[in-house]
Amino acid sequence: MNSTETDRPTPRPAPLLRHGLVLARRSLAKSLRDPGSLVNGVVTPSMFLVLFVYLFGGSVSGSTGAYLQYLFPGVLVMGAGVAGMLSSGLTINIDAKKGVYDRFRSLPISRFAPLLGSVLADLVRYAITVLVLLAIGHLMGFRVETGPGQALAACALAVGFGFALSWVMVFVGVLLREEGAVMALTFVAIIPLLLGTSMAAPVETLPGWLRAWAGANPVTHAMDAARALLTGAPAGDSVALALVWSAALVAVFAPLSVWAFGRER
């Protein structure tokens, strides 16, 4: 009988969280030594923000200032989403290939702890991305038109939605064996998920086929919710839908990730 599996304790919330936090600190220490994924997660949405505002602001909204007020909440959600999709799955896949997680499996911790540590570290990265984007947006002229509470809620929603998306990429990173495949799938997914939305223009102005996709896209709901919280735009049921989608993604892909992680690689 495998003594490692026999001696593995039944996961309990407190030890699981403690082990997850220790492994999150390890992941963040790695990011300090190699901050490439964090930089990419900030640079990509920042480039979209600057280019879209100054290229399309006048034609879409009549002025760059008005378009910035519309565009920025969507880019804020995009920032957390891009940061998660670019780092989560790839980091886990690389660590798995190097045998890092094989060593973790030999420890008396829940097999869920390494994955939890990775996504907890991602939460910190998403928060940094959101704060940097807020600073850039403010320098460009974006202003919150609601209140501090709503602005904080918008940031929390963006980070929470990025956290939910990260579980999708964690599953992909654990399931696929080659990092090239993870990168290819990530970039293929980013285009329709983050650009087929209401980020750059209202859904009503899109062609029919794209309007149908954008209306069903969970990222659209998150962007509309952030827009309502930051600028007072009509919210409809976007906040509720964003929260439901976030919870559903975690509920589905966190267990799938644990299952995939537990398989023999």
Image (cartoon, rainbow, N blue to C red):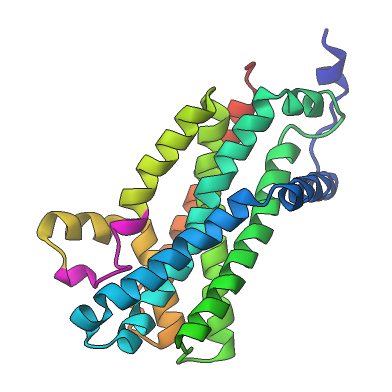
- In this rendering, the count of numbered labels is 0
Query: In the rendered image, which quarter contains the N terminus?
Result: top right
Query: In the rendered image, which quarter contains the C terminus?
Result: top right
Q: Foreground: 9 or 214? A: 214
Residue 177 coordinates in the image, percent (x, y): 54, 22
Q: Is residue 122 left or right of residue 18?
A: left
Farthest residue in the left direction?
208
Q: Is residue 127 left or right of residue 64?
A: right
Q: Is residue 95 left or right of residue 5?
A: left
Q: Is residue 102 visible?
A: yes
Residue 92 coordinates in the image, percent (x, y): 63, 35
Q: Foreground: 99 or 263? A: 99
Q: Relative to residue 130, is residue 119 depicted above or below?
A: above
- The quarter of the picture where residue 40 lies is bottom right
- Residue in view at x 64 percent, y 16 percent: 264
Q: Is residue 240 visible?
A: no
Q: Which residues are magenta?
A: 194-205
- The quarter of the picture where residue 226 lies is bottom left
- Residue in view at x 57 percent, y 69 percent: 130
- Residue in view at x 40 percent, y 71 percent: 49
| Residue 188 falls inside the magenta stretch | no
Q: Foreground: 262 or 181? A: 181
Residue 90 coordinates in the image, percent (x, y): 57, 37
Q: Relative to residue 195, is residue 252 depicted above or below?
A: above
- Residue in view at x 80 percent, y 50 percent: 25
Residue 70 coordinates in the image, percent (x, y): 34, 80
